[in-house]
Image: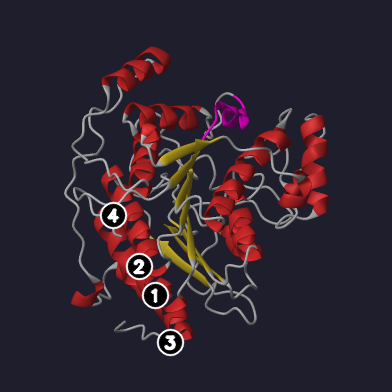
């Protein structure tokens, strides 16, 4: 099964994780991680008819238990989150709780654990085969590490999903992260685990938080090559980003042969995002989601969990990008020239006093050079790609120059 826009495909059983209780993950007015991102995505997806498809189930997540959270987080960290949640006036900045990025708020533990629970039920659905694809657009909190919150992320739901898959008998999982920021937390949790291939394409740490994610970060002893980083230069556009993706990701996924793909689709790579410096369109983000879905179809029997992540252009970008993600996962891609539903545009106007986009795409022409046409040492993106290929391709039996 492939997900090529415009073609009729079989309907894959698809779970979408959503309930309005997920908007309780709220760091307060003015914080970039606005819960309206989730509400607007759900509303747009419903207006497009995606959540009413017969083969799509919408499931409300439960709050993950401490035992579940402790499969990737330390008990001391979970206890610290609970303490700060109960008393937000007593932050624990050493663990990233109560900082400018992660302000403390009452109920923080339950709110974060509910988003984590969403990715856990997604993994369970893949394991029990009640769904082939699952989307938790409220997840993707990839900066959270074993012992520390970071970058708007308290609990790492993607890592929890990967661990549940492993505990459920899956032997190899590929984690693909296309957020503008390096997926450092997820990478660190599985740094020494050769069963998990973490691939992150992001803006270089030279110009963007968290300042990590370079080509020489390849995994711990015994797991060399399990961490892959493509640190793209500031200003990279669709053509360069897609060239980099297709020059690195398909080859490594093919060599690794995962049984499930877990992906993180932060859409802060968009040219209008206020926190990053990439130059990607919604069209390019949709193309990336399509490519990930195709990799799952080719290598994993279709088994695919997709999460959200960053993205701070709340009305213009996030709802469209993640609605495309849901549509692709459901096997019913929405054409880029589709008008944005008028009821949704009216809601945005009434609620936010803003004009919403008129089309589901940005009306750009997507084109990129295949890596096979040759390496250009004068091109900054090509130099980034070659650094990554040299660092990890030989560890997977691949030739950095030709594969």
Q: Residue at x 22, y 69 (%)?
A: 370
Label 2 crowd bin: few (<14), some (14–19), many (20+), radius 10 Å = some
The tag on residue 130 is none
- SS for tag 4? loop
Question: What is the secondary structure assignment of the residue under circle 3?
Answer: loop
Work out whether residue 53 or residue 177 is closer to the camera in this orientation and state it: 53
Q: Residue 22 location in percent, x, y? A: 58, 32
Task: Give residue 3's mark.
Answer: 4
Q: Which residues are magenta?
A: 18-28
**Going from the N terminus, do you reach mark 2 or mark 1 first?**
1
Instruction: Name the residue tied to disc 1.
Output: 254
Measured in 3D between alpha carbons, the distance from the residue under mark 4 to the one under mark 3, in whole angstroms, is 29 Å
The residue wearing badge 2 is 298
Position of residue 62 measured from the top left corner of the image (x, y, whole percent): 65, 37
Q: CA distance from mark 4 to mark 2?
A: 11 Å
Does the CB distance between marks 2 and 1 fall below 8 Å?
Answer: yes
Question: In terms of depth relative to the viewer, which is nearer, 378 or 315?
Answer: 315
Q: Residue at x 27, y 68 (%)?
A: 379
Asked whether 20 falls inside the magenta stretch, the response is yes
Residue 156: in magenta span: no
Among the 4 quarters of the image, the one containing residue 294: bottom left
Q: Give the mark, 4 or 2, whose residue is nearer the N terminus.
A: 4
């Amino acid at each position: 099964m492939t997900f090529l826009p415009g073609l009729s495909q079989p309907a894959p059983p698809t779970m979408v994780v959503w309930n309005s209780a997920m908007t309780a993950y709220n760091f307060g007015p003015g914080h970039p991680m606005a819960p309206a991102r989730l509400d607007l995505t759900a509303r747009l997806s419903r207006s497009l008819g995606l959540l009413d498809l017969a083969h799509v189930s919408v499931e409300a997540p439960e709050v993950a238990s401490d035992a579940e959270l402790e499969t990737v987080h330390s008990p001391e960290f979970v206890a610290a989150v609970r303490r700060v949640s109960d008393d937000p006036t007593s932050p624990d900045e050493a663990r990233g709780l109560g900082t400018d990025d992660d302000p403390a708020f009452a109920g923080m533990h339950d709110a974060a654990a509910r988003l984590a629970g969403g990715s856990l039920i997604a993994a369970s659905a893949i394991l029990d085969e009640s769904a082939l694809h699952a989307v938790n657009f409220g997840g993707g909190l990839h900066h959270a590490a074993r012992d520390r919150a970071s970058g708007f992320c308290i609990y790492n739901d993607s890592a929890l999903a990967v661990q549940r898959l492993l505990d459920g008998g899956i032997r190899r999982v590929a984690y693909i992260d296309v957020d503008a920021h390096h997926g450092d937390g997820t990478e660190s949790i599985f740094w020494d685990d050769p069963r998990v291939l973490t691939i992150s394409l992001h803006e270089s740490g030279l110009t963007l938080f968290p300042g990590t994610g370079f080509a020489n970060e390849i995994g711990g002893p015994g797991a060399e090559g399990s961490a892959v980083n493509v640190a793209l230069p500031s200003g990279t556009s669709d053509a360069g980003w897609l060239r980099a993706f297709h020059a690195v990701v398909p080859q490594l996924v093919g060599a690794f042969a995962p049984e499930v793909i877990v992906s993180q689709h932060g859409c802060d790579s968009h040219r209008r995002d206020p926190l990053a410096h990439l130059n990607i369109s919604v069209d390019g983000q949709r193309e990336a989601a399509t490519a990930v879905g195709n990799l799952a179809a080719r290598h994993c029997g279709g088994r695919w969990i997709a999460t959200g992540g960053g993205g701070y252009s709340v009305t213009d970008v996030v709802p469209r990008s993640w609605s495309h993600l849901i549509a692709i996962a459901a096997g019913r891609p929405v054409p880029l020239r589709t008008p944005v539903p008028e009821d949704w545009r009216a809601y945005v106007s009434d609620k936010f006093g803003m004009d919403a986009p008129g089309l589901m795409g940005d009306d750009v022409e997507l084109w990129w050079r295949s890596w096979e046409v040759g390496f250009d040492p004068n091109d900054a993106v090509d130099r980034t790609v070659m650094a990554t290929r040299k660092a990890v391709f030989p560890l997977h039996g691949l030739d950095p120059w030709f594969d």
